[in-house]
Image (spheres, rainbow, N blue to C red):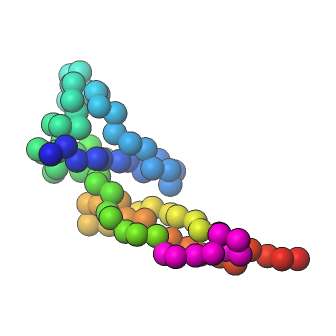
Amino acid sequence: MVKNFYRLDNGELLPMPQNGIRDGVAVSNLDKYFSDNIDAANAAGWYELADVAPPAYDAETQTLAVAYAVVDNKIVPTYTVTEISTQ
């Protein structure tokens, strides 16, 4: 099964392209290669996204923000719920 890998760029989550460069050589199906070689994916800066469900919130009175960090070779989302100011 092909896994989805991502890279963090200034806090932005970027999906892995299907084709790319590996050790200076053009590689097709890069996602499939890294699915079988997770250590190589991590060494190249590509990580799996941890499955973390966002919290429940009221979209009328609250906002939901997400920030990402690499933890134990996975990208982990952290959700923050903030009350909308009614001033």
Q: Quadrant of residue 16?
A: top left
* Nearer to the camera, 13 or 4: 4
Tell me which secondary structure the magenta stretch mostly adopts: loop
Left or right of residue 31, residue 63 in this image:
right
Residue 71 pos. (x, y %): 32, 66
Residue sitting at x 23%, y 38%: 31
Residue 35 pos. (x, y %): 17, 45
Quadrant in which the C terminus appears = bottom right
* Nearer to the camera, 64 or 28: 64
- Which residue is most to the left? 36
Residue sitting at x 38%, y 47%: 7
The magenta stretch spans residue 60: yes
Quadrant in which the N terminus appears = top left
Residue 30 pos. (x, y %): 22, 33
* Nearer to the camera, 65 or 71: 65
Left or right of residue 86, residue 50 in this image:
left
Using the image, determine if residue 36 lies above or below residue 62: above
The magenta stretch spans residue 14: no
Magenta segment, which residues?
A: 55-62
Q: Quadrant of residue 65?
A: bottom right
- Which residue is most to the top? 26
Residue sitting at x 50%, y 54%: 11
Left or right of residue 13, residue 4 in this image:
left
Can residue 87 be seen from the camera position used here? yes
Left or right of residue 79, residue 60 in this image:
right
Using the image, determine if residue 5 lies above or below residue 30: below
Using the image, determine if residue 78 lies above or below residue 37: below
Residue sitting at x 28%, y 47%: 4
Q: Quadrant of residue 82?
A: bottom right
Can residue 40 be seen from the camera position used here? no
